[in-house]
Image (cartoon, rainbow, N blue to C red):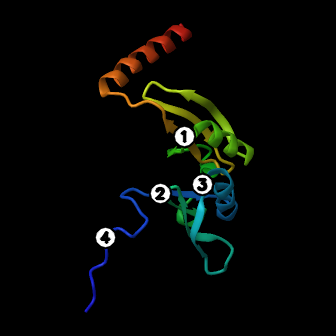
Amino acid sequence: MTTKPNPMPDMYRTVTPTLTVKDASAAIDFYKRAFGAQEIRRMSSPDGSKIMHAEIKIGDSMIMLNDEFPEMGVVSPETLKGVASSIYLYMTDTDASYKKAVDAGAHPIMPPSDMFWGDRFCKIRDPFGQEWSIATRVEELSEKEVMERQKAFFAQSAGARG
């Protein structure tokens, strides 16, 4: 008698990002150095020249990744010359995580700052074109407090431009 499989594999959450990069093997090494990623699985193409599918775990979350396969319409941010998404990564220390990522080769986009929604937040682009937002919750705020701070933030931003 067969048992019905769990509809979601162990270690996974409901949403799992998949990243396409030009050099998945190098990306895995970078994610290990920058974010403490653990490699879970790696499957090569039949000729062994590319990674068709890999899985890494950062903290309690899984990320899938693969090399580009332009012949199948699967391309990286480098080929697209831009990104269409980013990953929001909660870490215990935003400043230390930012420094570690930059030291590992990430390009800084925004240095760590305290944000109106209660997170200490920064943004980097990895060497493979993927953008990562790194954050640590530093304040528990009500929705009302967040909305008030958002208004003040945008009013201040408009004043600085104007």
In percent of width and height, residue 104 lies at 73, 48
Kindly identify which residue carries mark 3.
76
Q: Residue reaching furthest bottom?
A: 1
Residue at figure coordinates x 58%, y 34% from the top left: 122
**Picture quadrant where residue 149 is located:** top left
- Which amino acid type is marked by label 1? Ser
Q: Nearer the viewer, residue 143 or 107?
A: 143
Q: Amino acid at mark 3?
A: Ser
Q: Secondary structure at mark 1?
A: strand
Confirm or deny contact between disc 1 and disc 2 (CB under 8 A).
no
Q: Nearer the viewer, mark 4 or mark 3?
A: 4
Q: Is residue 125 above or below residue 2?
A: above
- Distance from disc 1 to disc 4, alpha carbons, whole Å, reads 29 Å
- Rendered location of residue 35, percent (x, y): 62, 52
Res. 103 image quadrant: top right
Find disc 4 in the rendering and name its residue.
7
| The label number, if any, that marks residue 61 in the structure image | 2
Q: Is residue 127 above or below residue 71?
A: above
**Secondary structure under badge 2?**
strand
Residue beneath the point at 54% across and 40% down:
133
Give the mark toward the camera: 1 or 3. 1
Q: Looking at the image, which residue is at 52% across and 38% down?
A: 135
Q: Earlier in the sequence, mark 3 or mark 2?
A: 2
Indicate which disc, 2 or 4, sits on the residue closer to the N terminus. 4
Q: Amino acid at mark 2?
A: Ser
**How many angstroms separate mark 1 from mark 2 (CA)?**
15 Å
Q: Nearer the viewer, residue 86 or 78?
A: 86
* Numbered disc 3: secondary structure: loop
Q: Kindly indicate the quadrant of the structure image that contains residue 107.
A: top right
> Which disc is residue 150 wearing?
none
